[in-house]
Amino acid sequence: MNQKPFSITKAYAALSAKTPLVPYSLERRSLEPHDVAISIDYCGVCHSDIHQARNEWSGSTYPIVPGHEIVGHVKGVGTHVTKFQLGDVVGVGVMVDSCRSCGSCKEGLEQFCEQGFSSTYNGTEQDKKTPTYGGYSEHIVVQEDFVLRLPKHLPLAALAPLLCAGITTYSPLRHWNVRAGQKVAVIGIGGLGHMAIKFAHALGAKTFAITTSPDKKIDALQLGAEDIVVSTDEESMKKHLESFDFILNTISAPYNISHYLNLLKRDGKMAIVGAPSKPIEFMLFDLIRGRKTVAGSLIGGIKETQEMLDFCGEHNITADIELISIEEINNAFERMIRSDVHYRFVIDMATLQNT
Ligand SMILES: [Zn+2]
Ligand SMILES: [Zn+2]
């Protein structure tokens, strides 16, 4: 008989856009030759978990088991798996597969797969039929090429947010070659922003945090910033006018972008990773004067995600987290909406056993 030791998994799911997450149970596939079965120890809570659970981006398909900041241990490997062994500490991020043959995939940029990558939840496998369920669960089965190796010497729970918040901010900093000798700003000190400050600082840039709240100064300095720029204080903004080489913009609420473009120096670049739900307007003169660039960035490819995790291992970088039990998840969503978290919630998946 075909053994299916990992098939049934406890989980938490949204059954509709308007109802809280509730205990749920689902079946994982049995191991294909290249599959890795992962026992999930911790899962980070990303803002997109809320957006998709509540259908705020539309197109959500229920039930949704959110979670794409997954860390755990290898509990089983398919017959052809060579990269992983039982007990390895591993992670899974936003993607669980892609077409592997388009131009983007061949370049290791699976996040831009021309056939659409398989998102870890609220998506489908590459057959475009089989639904995917995420990390708010006991275990998951993922093809080995989309499983990542984690640094062993760092606390596992604090590594979880690297799989989405980490790579989302690391990738643009690397793509636009942020380096020593540059002056860099990060707008917003949240789940994404706090990682961006740590990375920019570790890359050697003189890093500033742009925030609306002057009381975040001590936190920002602890994360590695030289100082903060208070966006609501004209004097503070004036002091940094036309001085930044690069700005990483993590704001997800509507805002006046011109305000920040004025902080870029000639040839300065702003990369955007936060997406407000309404269009943003600005005068193109804000770009023309000073030959400035505004660009977007989406997570990062698998190869770069591994590079980011190795970089975190070398520089001892982890996320600042608040560990919660799965029963606290609905309250955690509400607190995240109020930005009341330092800086990422991570669910202790052992608590699923109480449900
Ligand atoms: Zn995410
Ligand atoms: Zn592809």
Image (cartoon, grey):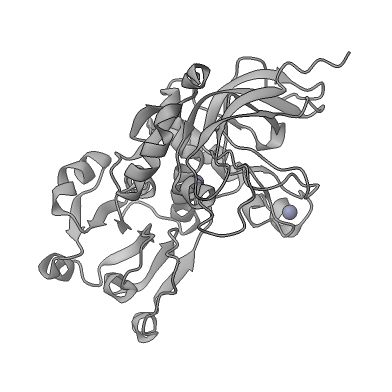
Return the x and y of residue 283 as percentages of the image width and height: 36, 85
> Which residue is drawn at the image coordinates 19% and 54% (left, top)?
228
Q: Quadrant of residue 183?
A: bottom left
Return the x and y of residue 297 as percentages of the image width and height: 51, 59
Would residue 66 appear left or right of 112 to someone viewing this image?
A: left
Between 285 and 274, the one nearer to me in the picture: 274
Between 77 and 19, the one nearer to me in the picture: 19
Q: Quadrant of residue 314?
A: top left
Would residue 120 appear left or right of 266 to someone viewing this image?
A: right
Residue 217, compared with residue 58, is above or below; it is above
> Which residue is drawn at the image coordinates 56% and 47% (left, top)?
16
**Exactly how many numbered labels are in the figure?**
0
> Which residue is drawn at the image coordinates 42% and 64% (left, top)?
276
Image quarter (top left, top right, bottom left or bottom right) of the N terminus? top right
Would residue 140 appear left or right of 106 to someone viewing this image?
A: left
The single residue placed furthest to the front in the displayed view is: 19
